[in-house]
Structures are given as C-alpha cells and as structure tokens.
Image: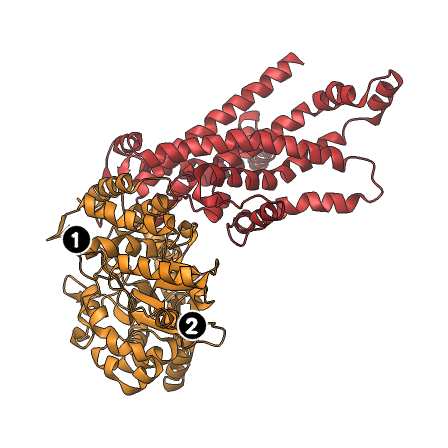
Amino acid sequence: MTSTSKNAAGRVDARRARLSRWLDPDETTLAVLLLAPAAILLSVMIVYPVGRLIYTSFLDLSLTSGLPARFAGLANFQQMLDDPVFWQATWNTILITLITVPGALLVGLGLALLANLPFQMRWPVRLSLLIPWALPLAFAGLIFAWFFHSEYGVVNDVLNRIGLPGVIWFNSPRLAFAAICLAIIWKASSFMAMIILAGLQTIPRSLYEAADVDGAGRVRQFFEITLPLLKPTIVVALIFRTITALQTFDIPYMMTGGGPGTATATLAMYIHQNTVSFLDLGYGSALAVVMFGLSMCVTALYLRMIRGSESAS
Amino acid sequence: MNLERISRIAGLLLGFGAFAFATGACAETTLKIFVTSQGQPGIWRTVLDQYEARNPGVKVAIELGGATSDLQAQYLNTVLTAKDSSLDVLMLDVIRPAQFAAAGWTSPIASENMSSYLRAYAEANTVDGKVVALPAFADSMFLYYRKDLLDKYGLQPPTTWDELAAAAKKIADGEQNPSLQGLSFQGKAIEGAVCTFLVPYWSQGKVVVKDGKFDFDREAAAKSLALWKNFADSGVAKKNIAEVATDDTRKEFQAGNVVFAVNWAYAWAMTQGADSAVVGKVGVARLPAVTGGEQATCLGGWEWGVSAFSKHQEEAKKLVEYLSSPEVSKIMAIKGSLLPTYGKLYKDADVIKAVPWFADAQPIVETAKPRPVTPRYNEVSEAIRTTVNAVLAGVTTPADGAAQIEARLKRILR
C-alpha cells in the first residue's frame, strides 16, 4: 500500500465516522435532539408568555397614563389587597367552581347513564348530548340571558302560568348568581357526560352479568361496579372542568355583565376589564398572576389525588 | 447577525412589499370606516355613496361596531393597542377623542377652522391646541313625552322631576293600563347610566371636576341616586329599570308603552317611522330639574377620528372633512334626525320641516354639560354606571352608592 492510498482510506474512514455520528448519535445527544422541538414549542407558547406576564405584573404600566413602564415592585399586588371588587370577583369565581363542578358532574353522570342504556336509536340521544357542548359559550350565555329576562323570558312565563309571580332575576345578586350557575351547569354537563360515557363503555358487560347472577340490585351494581371503575375517568373530567370553571368569563359576561353592580363579576372578567377596557396592563397582569396561581394550586391538588389513588390501587 | 439587523432587513422587505402593493392599488383606495351600529349606518352609507361617486378611485367600506358605546370602545382598544392598520376612520363617542389622542391612536387634523362648529364640539375635539377629530353629529339628552296623553289630561311638559312624577301618576290613574310606564330611563350598567347619574347631580349646581381638581358633593350624588330609585319604587318607572339600556327605552316608547322617556335625539326619527305606534303623538322638551335646581342635560354626539395607524392618512382626512361638512350634517339631520354640529343648520327651513323640534334644540345642546374629560374616562364611567345599576337593583343604598362613587373617582381623578 502506498501512503497516498492510506491517506485516502483514512479520509473515507473519517467521513464515515462523522456520518455515523449523525446517524447514530450517543444517548444524550439523541435525547436533546428529540426533546428540542417540544421544548422550543413550550418555551415559545407557554414559558415566554407566562414569564412576560409575571414580569409585567411588577410594572406600573397603564396605556392611558401616557407614561413609560416603571418598575413598581409589589405595588399592584398591594393594590389588590384593598380592592373590594377583586375580593368579590375572586370569591365569586371560587363559588362558581364549588357549585358548578359538582353540579355538572352529577348531571353529566346522569345523562351518561341514560345515554348508555340499550336504546334502539342511540344517535339522537348522543347528538343532543353533544349540542350544548358544541355551542359557543357566548351563545349559551345569550340564550340564558333571554331565558331569565324578567319581561320576555321563558322562565318567568312558566312561573306565571303555574300561578307564581315572576322574578326580576338580574336585580338580585343571589338570583342572578343562581341563574349563571344553572347556565354553566347546563353547558358543562354535556362535556362531563361525553367523557363519562366513554368511560362507561370500557366497563365489561360480564361484570354486570356476574352481579346479576349473584343477586346484586341495580343500585348496588352502580356503587360497587360502575362508580369505582369510572373513578379515573371522573378525575380527568374534574381536572378539565375545574380549570375551565376557574376561568369562567363568557356566560356571566353575556348574562349579567357582572351586575347588578359588580355582584356577579368573576376574576377573568375583572382581568379583562382592567386590561382591555382600562388598559391598565400592570394591574391586569397582577390579577392574571393570581388566577394562574389559583389554577396551579387546584391542578397540584388533583395530581396529588390521582397519585394517591394510584398508589392505593 | 444581531436582532436589530434582522429586523431592519425585515422592515425593508415589508416596506418594499407595501410599496409594491401601494403602487398596484393606486388606482383604487379602499378606506374602512368604523361606524356605531346604533348610529344609523344605512343613512351614512348613502352619504358615502355620494362621496364615492364624486371621488373616483376611492371606495369606502363600513365596519359596524357593537351595540353600545362601551362595547365599541373595548373593540377599538384591542385593535388600536395592536397598532392594527385595518381601520382608517373611526366614529367615536364624544367622551373618547381626548383619551384616544392621549394614547396616540388618532392623527391630528391640521388645517381645520373649528369656529363654525357649535362651541362644545370645537372644545371636545381640540386637545392641547390640536384638532384630534371632527364632529359627526351633535346630541344631548332630551325628555320625550306623549303629547296626546299630556293634552288629554291638561298637562304641560314638566320642568321638574317632581312635576313629572305627579303627571305620570295622573295619567296612570286615568288610563288604567298596566303596560303603560310613567318614565323610562337607562338603569343598565352602560355608558348612558353615567348621564342618568350626572343629570340630577348637575341640576343641583354641582360639578365633578373644578379647575382641574376633583370636586365631588356626596350629598348631591346621594340625592341624584335616590331620585331614580324612588321612580322605580313608586311605580313611575318599571321595577326592572336596572335592565333597561338606551335602545330599550327607545323601543318601548316607540311601542306606545311609555309616557316620558329620557333619550338622545336619534330616537326621534324612529318614533316617527313606519313601524311606530306613536307617530304624531310625540313632543320633545328640555330634561326637568330637581326642585329648586336648574335644568341640566348631558352632552352627547359622535366624532370622526383618523386612525394613527391608517396607511391612507391623506385620503382618510379628506373623507373626514367631507363627513363633518355642513352638507352632510344637513342630510343626516333630515334623514336620521341627528342634531347638526353647525349652529346655522338649526334655522335651516328643510331641517325644521323634517324635524320641527330642532328649531328649539340649539340652546339645549349649547348648554349641555360634558362628562369629565380624562384619559382614564373608562374607569370613571365604570365606577358611576355600576353603582347606578346596583342602586336601582336595590343592592346598594343611594347613600352608600354616593360614597362608593366618591371613593373610586377620587382615586382615578386625583
């Protein structure tokens, strides 16, 4: 062999080695490469906006003041402490969550059980389950606003027909709140029902047949078979539902606009008002940070619950 | 490559693109104007058609805004904070030019002599000596009344709110019609409710801002809120008045279900329209005073501004000058019963033939009071209207409501 051919072979080897390093990278490089797209996407879509939001929450930044942004420390959060509307909106948001999440779960469970019955014609039932969920939230809010209108609403019309006096629903904080909760439950229970229906169909029929043989009644079957096997499905549905309940905006916005006064305003509505209407981006961001914190707490709680139930089983 | 260089190149490319687009589109410019949906866009369209016919190469497209002044402002806030160039000309409620100019959202209009307009509008559209918008039409709140019913019971249009309550009672007792309301006004938490509060407050000789300083009279405020609440409690106004927005007042009056209504000038054309139950039965008067006070009303009206982000500044300004001209003001007065922004048109024979009560309207508009002028007007408005709404719904007492308004305004207007 001549030295030139040796050199040429060496070059080919080097090229091959480089190629194989690309085609067959070591474990760490591979991991980085595979995770990169997701990591980049997450940082652009989530980490950056959330970071920016937290940063803005420490600024005194209002577009109506004509002044440039100024670092304000915790001033925005301090302002929240003695802002009665903030406390009212936060309390309303928590109350809506506490009422409508279990409410939608119960109604949704009932609907799912009904839809799961051995019907001849299943599709009309399923379709009618789907419709409230497919309807835009603002539509649902508008529909219920008309339902509860004191003069033209169907609810007062029905009350009058059965001999009861009509009620001015949106004049009373409690009644207005009740009407909003009802609308949210109607809207949310179809989502619950669909997820639970999917869960129901994974439960094998043989379990019920065996229970029949053993002489267990319908009620017993529900509590001993259906409910335990549905638990994972229900937890997932609850997580989704709770987080959207904490962000409630459209339905009260369309139904009462937060009225009477500010009695039915939610945190999301208050954030919207401060940022979009008042253009006070600093305070609006601080409010949003609080809501973000609230959602994180609830999510952490549920995750802990799931982990607890997993280790128990 | 650093970020600045990248952005400069991107800017250049964009610039070339825009230039190429502009030269390509030179033959035809399309201006987009934002019009309130309550502002009778159909009639503005006829005026715009005329403009298009006279200016070949310019097309004007209308974009309709939401149903209330607040919804439109929310929409414009999002469009303009994003520096969106899709809107060229904006129809703005009289309370907004100052705010929009402070935010840098409208372009100043250079060569305009404001002295021919009514003084209130020359002032509302001039900020720090610069003309920031031009008047579209004038307006103020009036008392609409059922002339036929007042005549039937031998009554004169009331000059105080107490007289109005007594007149409403007399008519209600005589008519025995449960669907007939004595008085309709705006109790919903909308922009109109700000005027609802201010009218009796001003009538007591009080102001909100004096010499640039916050100057609030809590007792007068409580009295104003109590006045409206008493109308609802005593059955002069309907019980769900907290649900009533401006156009609800107009519809119910037009259907013949209301004796007295507080409303803007636009309602006139519709009460005399084809589907009105009260054609020829309507009178319009100055709003009453609180007993012992002076008659006061709220200055309204809408303005035309040019978006600072419009790519057609010159064309847009030209269009705005046309839209605020005496010619257009006269057409809108005759066809849309929108009050003219020029004093001379109040004596114009054609205008008075179409809308007879305009003959007496000029002094009312000229003495109407403007709502507080501040870049933070949205917060002022919110503080007042939610409280009016809460008081009328019975959630808050007038005294507490007045204290709440004072506390919130003090923080905003300090």
Looking at the image, which residue is at 37% across and 47% down?
Answer: B233
Q: Which chain wears orange?
A: B
The image quarter containing residue B236 is: bottom left
Farthest residue to the top: give it: A312
Identity, as a three-letter code, of the amino acid under mark 1:
Val
Along the viewing direction, whichever of B120 and B216 lies nearer the viewer: B216
Q: Is mark 2 on a helix, strand or loop?
A: helix
Looking at the image, which residue is at 62% across and 48% down?
Answer: A161
The image quarter containing residue B317 is: bottom left
Q: Which label belongs to residue B207?
A: 1
Chain ID, mark 1: B
The answer to which of marks 1 and 2 sits earlier in the sequence is 1
Q: Which label belongs to residue B131?
A: none
Q: Which label belongs to residue B270?
A: 2
Q: Colour of chain A?
A: red
Chain ID, mark 2: B
| Tag count | 2
Q: Position of residue A66 (x, y in %)?
A: 22, 50
